[in-house]
Amino acid sequence: MKKALSLLVTLAMALSLAACGAPAQEDDTGTADDQTQETGEPVELYVFAAASLTETLDQIIAQYQAVAPNVTIVPSYESSGTLLKDIQAGADCDLFLSAGASQMDTLEEEGGVLEGSRLDLLENRVALAVPEGNPKGIESFDQLAELLKSGDVFLAMGNSDVPVGQYTEKIFDYYSLDEEALNEAGVLTYGSNVKEVTTQVSEGAVDCGIIYATDAVSAGLATVDGATAEMCGQVIYPAAVVSSGGHPDEAQAFLDYLTTPDAGAVFESVGFTPLS
């Protein structure tokens, strides 16, 4: 009996020593100190942006990958009017960047803007751009108005549902020009977005075009005059999270990033003025 008891005591001591000497086991997640912070679930963020933002926004999206590597931004660039219609038709969209206030106003009135997310992001300028060498010798909007009246110029402008076209119509009103009569006289040609107008000028298919100053910079075009606020109002780009989008938090985070100095430097490089 004593021998059996001694054997049990010896075995218990051995097991105790083995337990004390064994390394502590960590669970699959490790401790709070040695865990690496997760970047979050992969997200595809659909951003609808005015065509005039193409070059700058592409650059900012590339920068944003370092900030939010789990977010893949899928941009769609078109005229703000077309993008609005797509959102109204149910297209997947998380964030809307418009080149005109009227399109954003419409979306907001319909309940399509997430409350509290709308802001005025940028200001641009409407400019009179000419092809390389300026063959027609156009120097100003004042001169353009006279050439349009005499039928001695061929001008490219945006459609009436495109913000740059709407700004052009205001310039026509400022100079008391009848757009319908000018169109019938064959001195106007149209583009469905500002990039189409810019291309017509770049290719020399027209004598001049009314576009944004930033598009002229991106396309390497010369501008001979800029429209004043008196002529066409301020050119404000509003932005907002779309209420029907699937990722409002991520959309707001990207919109917040667009107001940072890093993003602002990109916008300023082509002539935008950050407002937020």
Image (cartoon, rainbow, N blue to C red):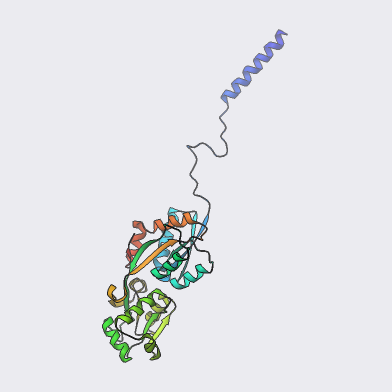
Foreground pick, 108 / 12: 108
Q: For the point 47% across and 54% down, which residue is it? A: 249
Q: For the point 32% across and 85% down, which residue is it? A: 177
Position of residue 45 in the picture relative to residue 230 (left or right): right
Q: Quarter-wise, where is residue 224 in the image? A: bottom left
Foreground pick, 80 / 108: 108
Q: For the point 32% across and 74% down, which residue is it? A: 126
- Quarter of the image that includes the C terminus: bottom left
- Residue 210 in sight in this render: no
Position of residue 199 in the picture relative to residue 2 (left or right): left
Q: Quarter-wise, where is residue 29 in the image? A: top right
- Quarter of the image that includes the N terminus: top right
Position of residue 173 in the picture relative to residue 91 (left or right): left
Q: How many marks?
A: 0
Task: Pick out the residue farthest to the front.
Answer: 109
Q: Quarter-wise, where is residue 252 in the image? A: bottom left
Foreground pick, 169 / 58: 169
Q: Position of residue 207 (x, y in %)?
A: 34, 85
Position of residue 63 in the picture relative to residue 137 (left or right): right
Q: Position of residue 75 (x, y in %)?
A: 47, 65
In the depicted structure, whether residue 172 falls above or below residue 51: below
Q: Position of residue 169 (x, y in %)?
A: 36, 80
- Residue 38 in sight in this render: yes
Foreground pick, 13 / 102: 102
In the depicted structure, whether residue 160 falls above or below residue 267: below
Q: Position of residue 55 (x, y in %)?
A: 40, 67
Task: Pick out the residue farthest to the top.
Answer: 2
